Amino acid sequence: MSTRSAGEAAREQLAFFDLEEWSDHLVESYSHGMKKRLAMGAALMHSPGVLIVDEPMVGLDPKGARKVRNLFRDLARKGMTVFLTTHELSTAEAVCDRIGIIHHGRMTALGSVEQLGRQIRSPGSHLEEIFLRLTMESEGEERAFFGIGNEE
């Protein structure tokens, strides 16, 4: 990015993430949530085709979390791929078109919430129920893997 376009993009991101009034402060004085918003703004400055985020809602207040959820949905509608990891199933259900469930280091399920609900023979289930059913292990029972692709 040119210096000029980087400056413009930085100002836009600071405004979007409500950090304008903090632009002349040291980042070390920022709260955890402010640092998260700043990092997201920095990642978006150059309009990437793919955004990879890990636990993006941790440390955000409810207003900030809503803003980020809406941002992810908007970016996806505009064609960006947003790949996020989270333990917050409500966030995944609210934001993601496709869900991958990893259990013991293996992808055990992949699809929309509706598709995953059909895999467990419980259409209309919420992601929490789906996740718990797909990752449940009983004593002495072999784990049944659901998903797409070959299993070794």
Image (cartoon, rainbow, N blue to C red):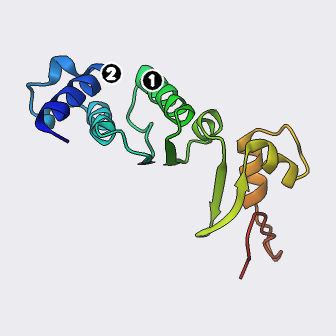
Q: Is residue 103 left or right of residue 13?
A: right
Residue for badge 2:
16
Give the residue displayed 87% in from the left and 49% down from the top: 118
Secondary element under disc 2, as helix, strand or loop, is helix
Give the residue displayed 91% in from the left and 51% down from the top: 121
Give the residue displayed 20% in from the left and 42% down from the top: 1
Residue for badge 1:
67
Crowdedness of circle 1 by 10 Å Cα count: few (<14), some, many (20+)? some
Amino acid on which disc 1 is placed: Lys
**Location of residue 8 with respect to 111 vertically, above or below:** above
Quarter-of-image position of residue 77: top right
**Location of residue 131 with respect to 3 vertically, above or below:** below
Question: Which one is nearer the viewer's eye here, 44 or 136?
Answer: 44
Q: Position of residue 7 (x, y in %)?
A: 15, 30
Q: Is residue 144 left or right of residue 28?
A: right
Cα–Cα span, label 1 and label 2: 9 Å
Crowdedness of circle 2 by 10 Å Cα count: few (<14), some, many (20+)? some
Quarter-of-image position of residue 142: bottom right
**Location of residue 93 with respect to 67 vertically, above or below:** below
Image quarter (top left, top right, bottom left or bottom right) of the C terminus: bottom right
Quarter-of-image position of residue 12: top left
Residue placed farthest to the right in the image?
121
Residue placed farthest to the bottom in the image?
152
Q: Nearer the viewer, mark 1 or mark 2?
A: 2
Q: Position of residue 35 (x, y in %)?
A: 26, 36
Give the residue displayed 52% in from the left and 47% down from the top: 86
Question: Which one is nearer the viewer's eye here, 81 or 63?
Answer: 81
